Amino acid sequence: MSFFDDLFRRVPALLMARRNLSRNRIRSGLAVLGIIIGVLAIASLGMFGTTLRTGADQQLGEIGNEISISPNLQEGVEELTDRDVDEIERAVTDGEVVPLRSESALVSRGQQQTVATIYGMENPGALYEAQEGRVPDRLRQGALVGSGTAEILDVEPGNTISVDGRTYRIAAVLAEEQGISLVSPNNAVVVPLEDVNGTGYSQVVVSSDSGQAANESAVAIRESLNERDERVNVFELQAITQGIDQFFGIINTFLIGIGSISLVVAGVSILNVMLMSTIERRQEIGVLRAVGVQRGDVIRMILAEAGLLGVAGGVIGAILAVGAGVALNSFVLNDPLATFQPVNFLYILLAVGFGIGTSILSGLYPAWKAANERPVEALRK
Amino acid sequence: MTHIIELQHVWKRYDTGGEVVEALKDVDFYADPGEFVSVMGPSGSGKSTMLNVLGLLDTPTEGTVLLDGQDVTDLSDHEMTTQRKQFVGFIFQSFHLIPTLSALENVEVPTLFGDDPSARERATDLLERVGLGNRLHYRPDQLSGGQKQRVAIARALVNEPRILLADEPTGNLDRKTGRSVLDLFDEIRREDDVAVIAVTHDPQLGEYADRTVQLVDGRIQ
Ligand SMILES: Nc1ncnc2c1ncn2[C@@H]1O[C@H](COP(=O)(O)OP(=O)(O)OP(=O)(O)O)[C@@H](O)[C@H]1O
Ligand SMILES: [Mg+2]
């Protein structure tokens, strides 16, 4: 209380403003409600955009860091050769090159059986991590089983399975890949390369640490392998993830734009409230001017009123927006804490700033009008 | 001794779309510190207009206004407001208190915008002096007419003005309350050497005034 007393002593415009607002609580309340809705709309729509993007990012996983090179069948290239792999390895400066062959086959253990994708690769460690057991650097014997397949067959490391008639001891069950992957391990079995029929490779995957490195590799590989003719197709997901990012950026801007419209409406309602209240207080303002209150102080007083409406609406709106964000994120992402990302605070700050800005802007005209009325006119009944 | 306020050949014309109304016609007027001047005249004769010019609330169309010997006719709005705050106290017929503020806060209003640490003390003293020491925190709607007028008087005095301007100060009060307000004016101009200029229809005000000026149709008689 004494803090406010002190504040009011120092900023008398605030005292007058607060008293004036409490004069017609319902009207002030409705004006604040308008700002609350506007701020809530901007902030929660912004956060909604973040949630969508986070969800999509989770789905996409690290896909942007991988590129896939496959033979260009249209040009008559059936498979990639060891020479191609050498060239790829030379072109890639940052990232691991994993050549592989794949086919579909029946996998069984006792009575249980299922059809799985069989990947033959030498260095699966570059792509996969184990959930149980260990992924060897070089796969010479044994098999790695994807989590989905392992579940169907009810196996764990140490068990044996049969793939297409051959028997393998399971070295590891692979960790489940949550997002999209070029060579998803979930419903697959990884076996040594030479166990899959064929001479060349059906695909080469390059796994890098970043999307940028992946992109650089893709450019270098195209330059070196497709110099004379289009020998290979280089499939790059970074372009897609960038596109998706851009898409969500547009959605976000669009959502915030919609939110802003409601703030404009709130601004008009504040303009209306302030205009009415200054017209009602015409005589009072005339008295203020007569007893020596300067024009500038009258303007400050009315702007303080508009500002207070904005601050009240902004603060309440921000609190509600955080609540809405927590609800949304626990519903969509199952993670309420996802609300508290820096970018979301930016949206809230933006919304509150817009709210206060709109209020003060709406107070400008009434303030100017009230301050410029001649006190003699205002005091005539 | 210079007059605290003086009008020289003051004209005030209003252009009401075609017809020009002359509210003040070549008015010469002055008041000295400690003097009680009453201004009388029929309705529409220009009394309020003259008071507004005296209080630097309005500017004359022609002529000169001297405040404490200084020509203040052509000051900017900001300077006029500053001079008004320093020299002039206004008392209005319908009190014009601010309904959301307490009696004490109403008296403080003229001091509010500006650094004035002793304002609260002065305001309290003044309210005690006008007999409202036990009503400091009442809002205007909790006060009687006479009490409101006394709050208005305290407000007019809080900046220690040299001139007190009152437009029909007793018009809304009964005879007895009116008399007590006039007694207060009398006390103020004696003790504080303030020039009191009051517009009135009230004949009992004549008993208090040192001098009565008659205004008829914009001219001093
Ligand atoms: N803003 C204005 N525009 C046009 N005419 C005006 C204006 N203000 C005052 N007048 C005219 O000036 C004349 C004097 O007005 P003023 O208010 O000074 O009279 P008054 O003596 O105070 O009357 P009353 O005793 O009724 O209060 C009147 O004829 C009035 O119509
Ligand atoms: Mg009048």
Image (cartoon, coloured by chain):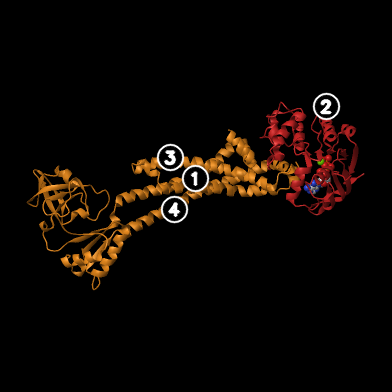
Chain colours: A orange, B red
Are discs 3 and 2 both within one chain?
no
Relative placement, left or right, of A229 versus A261 is left
Q: Residues within 10 Å of mark 3 (few under 14, many from 20)?
A: some
Residue at position x 55%, y 48% from top? Answer: A358
Quadrant location of the C terminus of chain A in the rendered image: top right
Q: Label 3 CB, ligand 1: below 8 Å?
A: no
Label 4 with label 1: CB-CB less than 8 Å:
no
Which residue matches tag 2? B176
Closest to the observer, B191 or B176: B191
Q: What element carries label 3?
A: helix
Quadrant location of the N terminus of chain A in the rendered image: top right
Instruction: Give the amino acid at mark 3.
Output: Gly
Mark positioned earlier in the residue sequence (4 or 1): 1
Q: Residues within 10 Å of mark 1 (few under 14, many from 20)?
A: many
Instruction: Give the amino acid at mark 2.
Output: Lys
Which residue matches tag 4? A254
- What is the CA distance from the residue labelled 3 to the residue labelled 4? 22 Å
Residue at position x 40%, y 49% from top? Answer: A49
Percent x, y of residue A364: 62, 49
- What is the CA distance from the residue labelled 4 to the residue labelled 1? 15 Å
Q: How many marks?
A: 4
Task: Identify the chain of the residue marked 4, using the numbered disc in the image.
Answer: A
Instruction: Give the amino acid at mark 4.
Output: Phe
Which residue matches tag 1? A39
- What is the CA distance from the residue labelled 3 to the residue labelled 1? 13 Å
Q: Nearer the viewer, mark 2 or mark 4?
A: 2
